[in-house]
Amino acid sequence: MKKEMSKHETDYIKKYEEEGYTSNFLFDNNSLIDSETKQVYKPEDITIVAHHRYEGMSDPDDMSILYVIETKDKIKGTHLIGYGPMADLEEAEFFKDIPEENYAQNSDINELT
């Protein structure tokens, strides 16, 4: 995971949207849900294309991870999760439960075509 301080999450979300990662995923009831179609996904249904970690410039406790996701049915989108003292533990466990082989290696916006 890359530690990034120079960009805000929304900068990367916009760049990934330009590359076709347009769905927004929400976490509810131990699942990721496509906010538009309401399709429900479990950890094994998710591939993490990239992830970027952010720490707040003015508040170090303001921490988040942007996940760039592709689902088993080829839906592409993003999900932003808080971490650190304010993290949702169930949401963090969901991402820990995604199989290791479903994580791309060192991918970022500059490597996507």
Image (cartoon, rainbow, N blue to C red):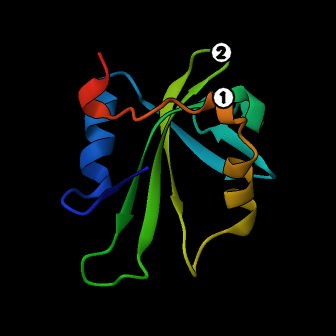
Say few, some or many: other residues with alpha carbon within 10 Å of mark 1 (under 14 / 14 to 19 / 20 or more): few
Q: Residue at x 43, y 71 (%)?
A: 63
Residue 102: name its quadrant.
top right
Residue 106: name its quadrant.
top left
Q: Amino acid at mark 2?
A: Asp
| The residue positioned farthest toward the left in the image shown | 6
Q: Residue 27: x, y in percent?
A: 67, 51
> Is 38 in front, or is 41?
41
Residue where numbered disc 2 is placed: 73
Q: Residue 57: x, y in percent?
A: 25, 76
Q: Residue 96: x, y in percent?
A: 70, 50
Residue where numbered disc 1 is placed: 101
Q: Is residue 31 left or right of residue 106?
A: right
Mark 2 or mark 1, earlier in chain: 2
Is 49 located above or below residue 67 in the figure?
above
Q: Is residue 21 left or right of residue 38?
A: left
Q: Is residue 6 left or right of residue 77?
A: left
| The residue positioned farthest toward the right in the image shown | 29
2 or 1: mark nearer the eye = 1
Q: Is residue 20 left or right of residue 6?
A: right
Q: Residue at x 67, y 49 (%)?
A: 95
Q: Amino acid at mark 1?
A: Glu
> Is 36 in front, or is 106?
106
